Image: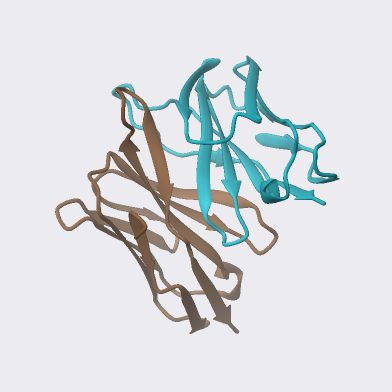
Chain colours: A brown, B cyan
Amino acid sequence: KNEVEQSPQNLTAQEGEFITINCSYSVGISALHWLQQHPGGGIVSLFMLSSGKKKHGRLIATINIQEKHSSLHITASHPRDSAVYICAVRTRASGGSNYKLTFGKGTLLTVNP
Amino acid sequence: DTAVSQTPKYLVTQMGNDKSIKCEQNLGHDTMYWYKQDSKKFLKIMFSYNNKELIINETVPNRFSPKSPDKAHLNLHINSLELGDSAVYFCASSQDFGRGRWVETQYFGPGTRLLVL
């Protein structure tokens, strides 16, 4: 079982719909990242969260540390939002001060016009 | 004015060859990373360097060796390429890495698609 689980795996929406993508993790973390990968393969870092909520344009990311859960919301979705959204958690690696990042499989979002 | 650049963008090579992928960032960041994305779209961190010092070294074969000549560059050299090395390799950078300060965001390069025949 992966330490980071995302749901849903695939999501199809109509333009204008409110989108929610979920990320659950099973370990204690120091930070959580949301990344976006476009069809051409490029990856963009959207948010880094350690608590609470962050907003950037139509994107909102929330995290509940106690429940080990984060959500990424997209308001007024648009076809250009079509991409893979990836959740990644940062945890302390074994052996001291090193950290590691563990990634979910991603959620493929398709927004139809 | 590309923030994080990788070369080459595509690399097709034969099994057994040795190849290098280069990464450069012009953001003045202290930390750089190499990730591998396999055919199932899993992203896995391979290495991370902070100010030319190796700080993450996940379980990867010894055939993979990162080289950081200065903090703006992190190159990935792969010896004796195998079929299973075929993947997309991403380089990324961030301002800092832990040590009491949060990393705000990581900036990714465009990726290098490696195909081993």
x and y percentages locating residue A73 in the rendered image: 37, 66
Specify the quadrant that holds the N terminus of chain A: bottom left
Q: Give the residue drawn at x 80%, y 38%.
A: B16
User: Observer-nearest residue: A104 or B4?
Assistant: A104
Q: Is any atom of residue B44 visible in this view?
A: yes
Say above or below: B52 vs A22: above
Q: Is residue B19 left or right of residue B2?
A: right
Q: Give the residue drawn at x 65%, y 35%.
A: B4
Q: Give the residue drawn at x 67%, y 50%.
A: B84
Q: Is any atom of residue B2 visible in this view?
A: no
Q: Is residue A3 left or right of residue B111?
A: left
Q: Is residue A72 left or right of residue A15?
A: left
Residue A97's quadrant in the figure? top left
Say above or below: B116 vs B96: below
x and y percentages locating residue A98 in the rendered image: 36, 26
Q: Give the residue drawn at x 75%, y 47%.
A: B114
Q: Is residue A70 left or right of residue A103?
A: left
x and y percentages locating residue B30 in the rendered image: 51, 21
x and y percentages locating residue B47 in the rendered image: 53, 31
